[in-house]
Amino acid sequence: MPIGWTDEQDGGTYRLKERDDEALFGYQVGPHSWKKYLHPPRRRLWQAEMRDNHMVIVDDEPDYPRYAFFGVRSCELNAITIQDTVFTSGPYVDIGYRERRKQAFIVVVNCVEAGGTCFCASMNTGPQAEQGFDLALTELLDPNQHYFVVDIGSKAGAAIIKQVPHQQAQEQEHMAAQQAVAQAARQMGRTLDTRDIKMLLYNKYEHPRWDEVARRCLSCTNCTLVCPTCFCVSIEEQTDLNGQTAERWQRWDSCFTADFSYIHGGSVRSSASSRYRQWLTHKLASWIDQFGTSGCVGCGRCITWCPVGIDLTEEVRALRDGEPRIGVAIPTLDAV
Amino acid sequence: MSTAVVDPMRSVVYEVQRIRKETSDTFTLELHSTNGSNDFPFAAGQFNMLYVFGVGEIPISISGDPSKHRSLIHTTRAVGLVTGAMRQLKRGDSIGVRGPFGSHWPVEHATGYDVVIVAGGLGLAPVRPALYHILHHREKYGNVVLLYGSRTPNDILFRREVEKWRARLDVDVHVTVDRAIHPWRGNVGVVTRMIPKAPFDPLNTVAFICGPEIMMRFTVLELQKRGVTTDKIFISMERNMKCAVGFCGHCQWGPNFVCKDGPVFDYASVKHFFEKREI
Ligand SMILES: Cc1cc2nc3c(=O)[nH]c(=O)nc-3n(C[C@H](O)[C@H](O)[C@H](O)COP(=O)(O)OP(=O)(O)OC[C@H]3O[C@@H](n4cnc5c(N)ncnc54)[C@H](O)[C@@H]3O)c2cc1C
Ligand code: SF4
Ligand code: SF4
Ligand code: FES
């Protein structure tokens, strides 16, 4: 975003606002995350050709661009680490992801202001990036000077810094950076109580709240598309008109569609409530069983970009104490 | 290519070697590799992703004998787009194969036990490899019981083979149909009805169940009624699958990925999810 502009975020709201300083990174995360580079929305896996009635698989020339990501927030860095686990830690490896990731150069910008839908402090994913970056900047604006405190996280990062005018940070500047980030931690627009969250959700499969949220949810899939950890894809077949070549395309998919769980005879999750339940339970509970961490980094995107402002922190609160958010009567009884 | 790991999403081309029509809508394909290396080790209960050119890719269990690596056998019911196109394939046609994937029937852990196999409809295909294995090592198991339910007598899968198993003295085979058609003289009714009288020792039994979810649900109940414990009951699950390797997310079932944690699960560990709807 240009100097002098920032954003204001809340459930279902994203507005630009002027700011009266010269901050370069004076804004929060937008709808796009780095996911679109490492795990592209559409990608051809391979092609097949018919030659004399025999199928031949044609591999694409490997083409792995070298990316430098500039301005990665701590929550997003954590999201990248989560996707690393999904795609590269199992017995099977997504080779494209691994190659793009291996070469990526990451410059973090620690947050000194938190947005209205942020809750990384609750998820232990920010606002300060702890590791996994090449460089981490903290932007400081005081009446006398505008400067960055830089943490060096790798040899590649150190090599870059050598070429940039810099000076050794003083104790006082370190302190200022820490205080600025701590300030952001206190400003989180949202909070999520993660105590025993896995069992909380596993035990609430039959809670009436799911039907209540489903009455508002449009199954539009926005939340999954903006989420930096959501990884689900579908694979589609594309053929040319004369039927001689076929291409296998991978594209982002979403558990909010009925098709997603289709098996012969119908969808497993045919109701919107079961789909919202799947999404939230996956993010906050089953992800822990599957990959050892939460699937949510508290970036707040799904709250901001939900057209009807559904807020997962609110939903968890409602599941926890059975309190309805809006004027709908909900029994407090746990149906489980 | 320089990468050490093979791309798990890439198919290998096989050729249809033999086609057998099993029932009006079900057929068995025997596949051979096109690069000469006809060796395809797999464990009973595992599946492959089969790709039909220009149409798509679907999960199909391997229904052949795991001791015979040389022929790769799948039995499929034509129900839709890809399976329908697969039915049109002829001898010599190409097909893409990825696999084998997933968990398997615990035939090794079942040694020393009575084994009860309960199959419904097409569910006989994914458990057939387990039965082959058990029959090859018959002396290692106690009683072996196959309970098989099919819609009508015409839908009985692997009919001649089932007759052969039935003729053996060391296996108890019981077949039932939902709807009898002349000249059927066998059992009529759901497969679960045969459980109370089946000859096995409940405290010393391992059960393999494969069929529609509703059938598996009632089978588990009947087995439990006889005293079989849930950790000795195994089921095979079906979910939409686009990748089979844990990347696409489609097959999720609670914390499980059916493609890599399943399709075969011990009932005790999935009970919580199996008993709920729309998970
Ligand atoms: C582990 C596993 C093993 C299987 N083994 C066998 C087998 O041995 N024999 C057999 O006949 N069938 C088996 N199935 C079911 C088989 O995969 C489906 O019948 C097949 O995918 C239907 O595809 P279609 O394109 O013909 O149907 P359509 O109705 O046109 O389906 C469209 C798409 O939905 C998905 N889909 C539909 N039904 C299923 C389903 N039941 N399971 C998973 N995805 C589905 C597929 O992606 C399919 O391409 C198995 C499924 C799984 C998960
Ligand atoms: S679930 Fe929402 S808050 Fe959590 S990481 Fe995804 S988009 Fe961000
Ligand atoms: S929760 Fe909101 S963003 Fe997500 S699918 Fe429902 S309406 Fe769309
Ligand atoms: S089939 Fe893709 S994750 Fe299981």
Image (spheres, coloured by chain):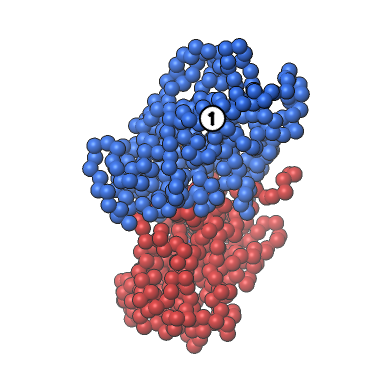
Chain colours: A blue, B red
Q: Nearer the viewer, residue A179 or A216?
A: A179
User: Does residue A70 lie above or below A263 as drawn?
Assistant: above
Which x, y percent locates residue B189? 31, 74
Residue at position x 33%, y 43% from top? A318
Residue A31 in view here: no
User: Does residue B36 lie above or below B142 as drawn?
Assistant: above
Identify the subunit bearing mark 1.
Answer: A
Residue tagged 1: A182
| Residue sitting at the far bottom | B169
Which quarter of the rendered picture does the C terminus of chain A lie within?
bottom left
Disc 1 on helix, strand or loop? helix
User: Does residue B138 lie above or below A318 as drawn?
Assistant: below
Residue at position x 48%, y 14% from top? A19
User: Does residue B3 lie above or below B174 as drawn?
Assistant: above
CB at disc 1 and ligand 2 closer than 8 Å: no
Which x, y percent locates residue A287? 50, 48
* A48 on left or right of A332: right
Kind of residue at disc 1? Ala
Which x, y percent locates residue A330? 25, 45
| Residue sitting at the far front | A172
Residue at position x 42%, y 56% from top? B79
